[in-house]
Image: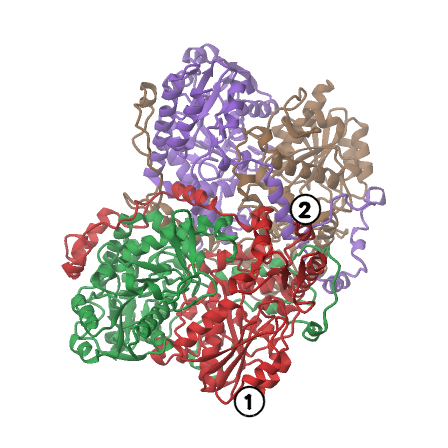
Chain colours: A red, B purple, C brown, D green
Amino acid sequence: MDYISNTAAERNKMLKEIGIKEVEDLFSMIPEAVKADDELNIEAGISELELMRKAQNIAKKNKSLDQQISFLGAGAYDHYVPGVIDALISRSEFYTAYTPYQAELSQGTLEAIYEYQSMISDLTGMGITNASMLDGASAAAEAVTMGARISRRSKVLLPDTINPSYREVIKTYGSGAELEFIDLESKANIIEPELIKENIDEKTAVVVLQYPNFYGSIEKMEEISKITKGNKNIIFVVIVNPILLGVLKAPAEFDADIVVGEAQNLGSGLNYGGPNLGFMACRDNRKMMRQLPGRIVGKTTDIEGKEGFVLTLQTREQHIRREKATSNICTNEALNALMATIYLSTMGKTGLKEVGEQCYHKAHYLAKKIDKISGFEVANKDNFFHEFVVKTKEKSSQIIDKLLQKDILVGYDLKRIDEDGILVCVTEKRTKAEMDNLLENLEVL
Amino acid sequence: MDYISNTAAERNKMLKEIGIKEVEDLFSMIPEAVKADDELNIEAGISELELMRKAQNIAKKNKSLDQQISFLGAGAYDHYVPGVIDALISRSEFYTAYTPYQAELSQGTLEAIYEYQSMISDLTGMGITNASMLDGASAAAEAVTMGARISRRSKVLLPDTINPSYREVIKTYGSGAELEFIDLESKANIIEPELIKENIDEKTAVVVLQYPNFYGSIEKMEEISKITKGNKNIIFVVIVNPILLGVLKAPAEFDADIVVGEAQNLGSGLNYGGPNLGFMACRDNRKMMRQLPGRIVGKTTDIEGKEGFVLTLQTREQHIRREKATSNICTNEALNALMATIYLSTMGKTGLKEVGEQCYHKAHYLAKKIDKISGFEVANKDNFFHEFVVKTKEKSSQIIDKLLQKDILVGYDLKRIDEDGILVCVTEKRTKAEMDNLLENLEVL
Amino acid sequence: MEEKLIKNYSSPGRKGYSLPPLEVEKSEFNQEISHYLREEVELPEVSEVDVVRHYTALSELNYGVDSGIYPLGSCTMKYNPKRNERIARIAELSNIHPYQPEEQLQGSLEILYQLKLDLAEISAMDEITLQPASGAHGEFTSLMIAKKYFEDKEEKRTKVIVPDSAHGTNPASATMAGFEVVEIASNKKGMVDLDELAEALDQETAALMLTNPNTLGIFEEDILKITEMVHNVGGLVYYDGANMNAIMGYAKPGLMDFDLMHFNLHKTFSTPHGGGGPGSGPVGVKDFLAPYLPKPLLKKDEEKYYWDYNRPKSIGKVHSFYGNYGVMLRAWAYIKTVGGKGLKKTTENAVLNANYLKARLKDKFELPYAEDSLHEFVLSGSRQKAEGASTLNIAKRLLDYDQYAPTIYFPLVVKEAMMIEPTETENIETLDHFVETLLTISREIKENPELVKNAPHSTSVRKLDETEAARNPNLRW
Amino acid sequence: MEEKLIKNYSSPGRKGYSLPPLEVEKSEFNQEISHYLREEVELPEVSEVDVVRHYTALSELNYGVDSGIYPLGSCTMKYNPKRNERIARIAELSNIHPYQPEEQLQGSLEILYQLKLDLAEISAMDEITLQPASGAHGEFTSLMIAKKYFEDKEEKRTKVIVPDSAHGTNPASATMAGFEVVEIASNKKGMVDLDELAEALDQETAALMLTNPNTLGIFEEDILKITEMVHNVGGLVYYDGANMNAIMGYAKPGLMDFDLMHFNLHKTFSTPHGGGGPGSGPVGVKDFLAPYLPKPLLKKDEEKYYWDYNRPKSIGKVHSFYGNYGVMLRAWAYIKTVGGKGLKKTTENAVLNANYLKARLKDKFELPYAEDSLHEFVLSGSRQKAEGASTLNIAKRLLDYDQYAPTIYFPLVVKEAMMIEPTETENIETLDHFVETLLTISREIKENPELVKNAPHSTSVRKLDETEAARNPNLRW
């Protein structure tokens, strides 16, 4: 089926009004030389019944997380998604709208973004939050290029405790912005502050840290922050897992300049890694504000004095500043930002805290037990939040494969980034029974 | 979890306003002798995650129609349900509202019911349609009692070609209304007009026929109608399958007085037989209108002359007439009526026709092929629409069981009503491949 | 109207549907069928976009529980949890045919059985049928059970007693079951008048129908006396479960010696009201009435759940299949979510909210019955009526403030009645806002009665002419 | 504001969430972590009902495609089919982790692969990456590919040429990729001025960025000449796919000799815009550029689909994972539903609708470029401006008539621009209604310009003060 509303008779009426005979005439300005002469080699359209059947049949070739126990994390997290979220974002006034260019008829989207900005600011402790970024990695990349613009320097310290995908994306963007990257090597899954100190010089633009880091450990954020603050031009970028900020200190407390991260875990679900939700927050000062990429919503008043919301500070944006814009970002992840807003409202103050605590206690329960099984060792010791590295005697890929047969996804194989071990993640969704199932299987491996 | 909005502090504030100390005090008027002293013996509440898990686990004990090929009909039909229906009825303004008592804030529900009434009237050719009945069987039962009230008589001719469940419900209601039923026996799955003629006398209140009948065959509607019209006090009630009315003549054309049926197949899906959608339509005259049960929506104007919709003719209803009401029906199947309205709008004039035609041609394709397989015979010959009776050499229950092993639900076992054979139904959803699968399996049985 | 009828979007040849190709050769229509074919049917011809926009627009002219307070007395318009909607849409639980073999549906039957057990526990009834599809349907089913019971005992009992404060469906259901209705007046406390009751009771009395707390929200102080009196003449006592939200965990119909009752899953157990339905009205009975329940009855043996059709004393069927299963799934999800303690807390908060509203409103509006009340209460607008605006006007004026109106002009025993039931899911701010709005309207009546009398002003249509609608019915396009 | 902020519903201790019990014993927090624990976080404390009502109320202050015409030029606001939403919510297709083994996800990969093939067919490009998450992201990816390509060839090329009518994201993306932007003026037909182009082109030219038809809806008559000129200096020609809805089945970027391009799945392929996102911006390239595509790239061998990470020349990654997969599912569903012929018909009707609007409006509004146009066209409100109301005023006045406004003040080459793109899913009645509304507004400007200048009047807020918002930014509670 197609989605053409007009009938043949109506089309004829319209052609007449236009003053032409055939629809093809509308395309007469396309030079013959480039006109497609063949029909598109794409199968004929199908009905909804056939589409659903086709999709269901293809879907059977997948094995979803509903069909196994997953301890996969490594940047994409399987947290509880309250049912109200889908019910509310399915309101078509939200999801079929576009960027709220006409503020007066878009107050729903605008107010929700304002709430999103406020809650991300509350979580991170930062003064300003933008309306969303494409994902965590590109948000991190744009934070780095933003930092470099502000510091007017080009060297970036990039620890290997940052999610490897993020590092790759940061480097892609950095290559566009012609930045220089210094890769820093961790010890025992964290970066020694000394290493940062050694690598800082007068060209250093940006220091980036992840909190908790890729391996689940908490870096020495305060010490490193103090070191970066020793050089006032350096911008300290912190990549944070927002769902843990119900329990963990806001990055503002250790003087982050720009805070970014992936908020997919705030109500968006997994979706094979996209659409995700990048967020970006920064200090509340004019210099930062001017360099912040992306849309921002502000509160204002209408001509009768009633409060309302608009897109603001648009002079930073590409449709006004064009090549001088802070970023090219236009379409963002507004609907996912709405999901995060509803998530944070639903979970609220105590819920977010409980999620963080459950993650911590469940992960530590599992880690302690794994550590006791012969052939397995938890590398992070007890410095981790809800992800940890298990070093294995046997090859990690073999262990992963054997557990796959038991319907368990035990974790992320660090072989993917040429390291040893398995990165195991435990969220509040994992039950004791599921963890005990894993433990039993590990014991008999 | 519970759904209590107020906090302990707020509850205390409220208790203070009321002037009592404890919530329990609110229940002091309940005599001690009847006060429950034990807590309810119902497990503690659970979180959404646990609920979803519990439901998913229980659901695995079911085998749905998605997991097999179904030719089951017999009063509940597996037709295509356009996806827009669920998207639209999930608008909370529709589904969380109640009966539109305050018309001015319920124009959405009211206008949709008016459209529903109009479309059912267009399908059946009847002048008046009510806002819905509980299901097809109770609609049929209420049509019979309504007919008896109008004719002021008590004898009802009840052919055995009517859906047996309907006959049971009709008799239950009839027992309340103290009606007398004459069961009529069919030959070759239809009722001979002569039989009706023989059984009509001066006490006959109602003649009921199903169109197509329970076995899928078309009765001699016109002949029988003429016979009933020979006695002007008799009310001719027709039970119709509404999805076939895109192809089949409207019952008004053969002079039905009251038309009822089950409109579950107009967009409601199966849901194990409920919520279904009973509908009832009748001739447009005052006598009929006064006796019609249930809600009715009418168009009117507001004080500024603008058109709008209200519940009307409420003097028939129980909240005004109490024991003199035409029926006790209050809560009906409004949301299913909305589904039917959206279904009929989406399918429209040509879609409904195509559905009917596909049902017919597919059913006849299958029937012809089955008829050729040794050990099987189609009893209706070619007088059936989309359901037919297959007589089997082997016991029907054995055939049904064998096909179950092949993931095929071949049909309704007529043994349930002490007859031989299997009632097979083919809707537009069945594919040629599915039918050929059944045929191949029948051949090797 | 604010949004034109779907028919008026129609354009010849426009389509909004899609179907797979036919795939098989066409068959001739046999002679009988050919005769019954129609040329065409008048239905809209619109696109999918037209459909989506039209019904989206219509929804915006509506008000539901998600829009705000919906204080319809005796309707228990509580929040309808979204998670229950998800449960009801699980394909394995919903895309199932009523005639699939029971072996294929043990999951669904397990859910229904759990629901039965929980309803029995809440009510102290012994056996439950889930078949009735609405509250009134449950009433009718109950009365047919009573009828059959007496037939079986070969007692001729023709009368059903109904208090004048009863829901209108009670007398209507009794009539449908073939009984003669005897209405008895309430006493000045709003309760059953024991003298009136004694007078009405005799050997022809089949049943007394009672809701407790009654529609005034008042619990019958002599409930055990009442049930005893009816039992003494050999009659049955039937409990109308519409007001169950008032007593969960505090009292049980079975312990008050009721013999049979119905539940409203769409009231007490949070299933959505759907703009008027579907509901679900299970019936619970004491053991001695169990044989008369509709067939089939859900049972469990050691191995599996099954439908028992072998019920010779059954009243028969009242529904094509097993009742409103989709509604039952939601009610099951609700009970599992809230749990036993949660149900009691639910009742406590429903009653607390109602009493809070009553406390805040009783000075400005006449409170015709001073008795303590539970989950709902009835005010009278008679003072305001004297000042120039009726209860109807007040109700309409509430709409201007984006709040739904209470049930009005019911129960009939109260003049200018406003029957208010906030439910437990409303919070104090919403309740306060409702109170303040009513107080504002009360002031408006004094200061500018015309404003209230001409309400509503801000809805998509102004006050509609109901008289005209009934006089010249326009019931279809 | 019409609906207060969620924070203002907060009440200490109120909860709207539910979590299972912890089940395991608590662990101590190690010293490092203890140091980083926070006391509490400021978030709302609200009930589930509060959340549901608040966001339902907010939605009602919004306008989407389901509400009516949404004629934003270059945004292709077509109807978003509901069936695609169902596809995207199939659990086996959506509840999957990006690091599950490929063997477990052959279904999803098959869908993505089919999507790639179809996009390649539509565009005549050879290889496709689905990784970019928006149109601008696709632009950036494309320019990084160009950059890497020239680095690989050891050519130093620093310039990217962009016509003045281009989308603002083009110059911004070029800058982000480290290029210098050279803007060239359009000729009086609204097309690329070949002389200007010739002048701009040199050995330092990395690429020309072009959308065709351009933002005026006009197809470049000399397109082959243009691409040839760029190729002659060794540059690449990039196609901005925002306007693909204008040419499907009629022309292909690959056949116009474009070297690389991006698609907007959320425009051409009907995925919902989500109030600003998510979108999806796949990039297509000719074979010689394929080595530079981001990694991983989806491939198929005889046995299975897999992600190829072994791409030494790749520009690297631009997204954490594989892009906006959920959006791709919807686009796949759309293409499968509509089919090859349907896509062509889609384009035909998009163009027909735009031309019909243009024909009906061009007498009352200035049409700055008389050239034939395709799926969108640009009017100027300069005549109306002279009469006292600007294009902004007209846009705001449209809101009073419950219609969304076109893109305004863009492209920059037209004064008081209104860029109108109706899409194929609008029907003639909606188009006529839009025309008549604009004509009404045009009359209003003559008769009562203040009415238009002070618009909107009927929205939940009146015209908002943007200047104040930017001067004293209030960006959070």
- Identify residue type, mark 2: Lys
The reply, left or right, for residue C203 in relation to residue C142 is right
Q: In this view, does C312 lie above or below D12?
A: above
- Identify residue type, mark 1: Asn
Label 1 and label 2: CA atoms lie apart by: 59 Å
Residue labelled with disc 1: A231
Q: Is mark 1 on a helix, strand or loop?
A: loop
Residue in the picture at 56% in, 68% down: D4
Residue labelled with disc 2: C336
Q: Where is residue B51 in the image (x, y as percent from the top left)?
A: 64, 48
Disc ID at residue A441: none
Which of discs 1 and 2 lies nearer the camera? The answer is: 1
The reply, left or right, for residue A134 in relation to residue D340 is right
Residue in the picture at 71% in, 40% down: C118
Residue in the picture at 70% in, 75% down: D35
- Provide the chain ID for the residue under circle 1: A
Q: Where is residue B370 in the image (x, y as percent from the top left)?
A: 40, 20
